[in-house]
Image: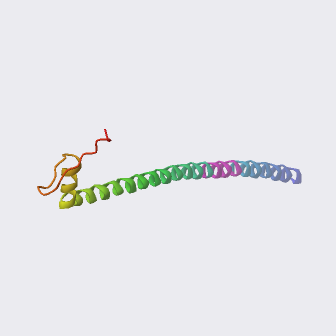
Amino acid sequence: MKQNQQMKGRKNIKKRKKSLNIVHVVSFAFIAYFFVTFFNQQIQINKYNSQIEMYNKEIEAKQSLVDYYNNQNENITTDEYVESVAREKLGLVKPYETVYIDSNKQ
């Protein structure tokens, strides 16, 4: 009888060891999956953050260009700008002005 109980006790110990091994393997697999997923997500987050930073810089560049063109648009309508273009590009002068041509300049 005692020997029979010892045999059952040994079988129970073996079953517990097998069940503990399975629990350990499943736990290890879950933890490994968690870490792999976590690191992959961190890589994706870093990638998206760098893209966001790149797009923000691009937006700033475009905004400064828009500001420049808005400023140019405001300047184009001024009398001083119209006069400077007429003088420099078209060679026009006011009626009371005398034009001197530099003969040394070619």
Residue 104 placement: quadrant: top left
* In front of the other: 20 or 96: 96
Q: Residue at 66% of width from left, 52% of height from top?
A: 27
Q: Give the magenta part as a residue range.
A: 23-34
* In front of the other: 62 or 50: 62
Q: Residue at 58% of width from left, 53% of height from top?
A: 38
Give the position of the C terminus as an image quadrant. top left
Q: Is residue 26 magenta?
A: yes
* In front of the other: 16 or 99: 99
Residue 67 placement: quadrant: bottom left
Q: Residue at 88% of width from left, 54% of height from top?
A: 2
Q: Residue furthest top?
A: 106
On the question of residue 6 being in view, the answer is yes
- Left/right placement of residue 11 relative to residue 64 reads right
Q: How many marks?
A: 0
User: Residue 40: percent from the left, percent from the top?
Assistant: 56, 48
User: Residue 51: percent from the left, percent from the top?
Assistant: 46, 50
Assign the magenta stretch its main secondary structure: helix
User: Residue 21: percent from the left, percent from the top?
Assistant: 73, 48
